[in-house]
Structures are given as C-alpha cells and as structure tokens.
Image (cartoon, grey):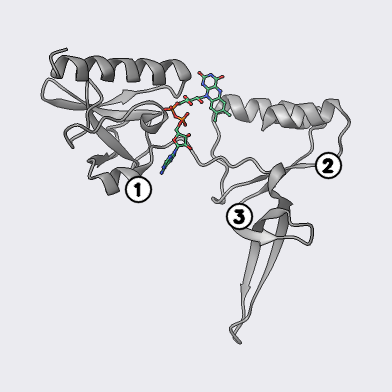
Amino acid sequence: MIAILKAKRERNDTQPVYWAHKSEKFDVNKETAQRLGEEILLGGNIRLLPGATPRIGEVDDEGVDRLVIRINEFKQTDGIDLYHALSFPMQNVIACIGSQGPVPIFDKLGVQTISCTAGVCKVAKEGDRLVLLTAEYESTRKGVYVVGGAISPSYMKICEGAIQEEKHPNLIYTAINDAYRVMEAIRQKLGM
Ligand SMILES: Cc1cc2nc3c(=O)[nH]c(=O)nc-3n(C[C@H](O)[C@H](O)[C@H](O)COP(=O)(O)OP(=O)(O)OC[C@H]3O[C@@H](n4cnc5c(N)ncnc54)[C@H](O)[C@@H]3O)c2cc1C
C-alpha cells in the first residue's frame, strides 16, 4: 500500500489511495506507521476509511464488477436503510484478508486450534486461535499436515509434552521448507 502511494506520488497521480478497514482503529506496527507518516508528509494522497463494510456483487453499466464500501448506515423507523458508500472498480482493488490462519477451514477439517490467553502468546493476540501442530507440522487429526501461510505468523507447537507458541514468518522460503519437512516425515512413516 505504501509502495502504491509512493509510486502515485512520484508520477504526480493526484487520485487518492483509499485504505478501508473493517475496524474503527488501524492497527499497524511501528515501522509501517513511520513509513506511512513519511509518505504522507511528502505529499502521498491517502484516504482512510475506518469501520468500512465491503460488499461485492455490484456490476456497473459497462459490466465491470465493483466493490462497494459502506461508510455510514442510517437505520430508519420505516425499515428503509440509508447508507453512504464508495464504489470502486474491482480491478483497482487489493484485498488484504489478514495473516491469521484459516480457522474456519481448520474447524471444518476437525483440526484442533487453541485460543491464546493473556500473557501466553507473544506473536498472536489474546483470543486468536492457533492451530496445534507437532514438530513435523502434523495436526491433531492424524495425516492432516498444515504448512506455509496457513500457519503464519505463529502456531502452537507440541514439543516433548509441552505446548508453546512458535513464530512462523510468512515467507516463500518457510513454506517450501515446511513442505520439505512434511514430505520427509511422510516418507519415513511409510518406511521409504
Ligand atoms: C503482497 C505479498 C507480497 C509478498 N512478498 C513476499 C516476498 O517478497 N518474499 C517472500 O518470501 N514471501 C512473500 N510473501 C509471502 C508469500 O507469498 C507466502 O509466504 C507464500 O505464498 C506462502 O505459500 P503457501 O503455499 O503456504 O500459501 P499461498 O501461496 O497463499 O497458497 C495458498 C493457495 O490456497 C488457495 N486457497 C485458499 N483457500 C482455499 C480453499 N478454501 N480452497 C481451495 N484453495 C484455497 C489460495 O487461492 C492459494 O492459491 C508475500 C505475500 C504477499 C501477500
């Protein structure tokens, strides 16, 4: 996002970059906040849309799919809702769906997750659910392994009878490394 902002500024593109977030607060790390602040001081044109509700499914007269971001909703007594919204052509939209593991998929697969309690996790936040894995990335459902981006930025590692949060950077290298270790573990199990 900061790279897009910078590229637009350098090309004197005055159209803003819109950053919509479902929360009222934009929770960014110190480095991102600093870089964003610098970019804004240099003239980067960004509009923040907190508390935004995205809606897909709208198609305009030219057949272009659009993303509608509702900013305010006004419930009326007659049952008709009024809302302010911005509509963006989908090809200009970058969706950031977060970096937490796909918990609903884990639930569907019967793969166990554990909720972080206060003071236990350093990477994950309190209440985040982390998948429980062995050192070979096998879940509590035997034969189901979870690797790569699905276990980033951290997971719960079962090691020598104890369970602790394990940091797991979301990188191509770690994803490939995980897969290699899983392949090795399966190969050994099969006695190959
Ligand atoms: C903008 C961006 C820049 C990045 N830059 C770097 C970088 O410079 N260097 C680096 O090392 N890493 C970078 N990363 C991280 C890197 O992309 C990931 O670590 C890596 O792709 C993880 O690989 P993966 O195979 O685990 O997951 P992914 O590559 O995310 O693959 C998961 C696949 O599963 C599919 N999928 C999801 N849900 C379902 C479902 N329900 N059913 C079927 N399919 C599904 C997805 O469509 C996707 O194709 C970047 C990531 C992003 C988003």
Tag 3 near tag 1, CB within 8 Å: no
Identified at 12% across, 14% down, the residue is: 191
Does any portion of residue 85 appear in the rendered image? yes
Question: Where residue 88 appears, x then y in whole percent?
Answer: 72, 51
Distance between the alpha carbons at the discs numbered 2 and 3:
20 Å
Question: Where residue 64 appears, x then y in whole percent?
Answer: 73, 53
Q: What amino acid type should be assigned to the residue bearing mark 1?
A: Pro
**Residue 169 picture quarter:** top left
For marks 2 and 1, the one nearer the N-term is 2
Q: Residue furthest bottom?
A: 78
Identified at 82% across, 31% down, the residue is: 43
Q: Residue furthest right?
A: 12
**On the rendered structure, is 148 left or right of 35?**
left
Q: What amino acid type should be assigned to the residue bearing mark 3?
A: Ala
**Residue 162 picture quarter:** top left
Q: Which residue is mark 3?
A: 52
Q: Secondary structure at mark 2?
A: loop
Identified at 61% across, 87% down, the residue is: 78
- Dot label at residue 15: 2
Q: Secondary structure at mark 1?
A: helix
**On the rendered structure, is 111 left or right of 127?**
left
| Quadrant, the C terminus | top left
- State the count of labels: 3
- Dot label at residue 104: 1
Q: What amino acid type should be assigned to the residue bearing mark 2?
A: Gln
**Residue 30 picture quarter:** top right
Distance between the alpha carbons at the discs numbered 3 and 1:
22 Å
Mark 2 or 1, closer to the camera: 1
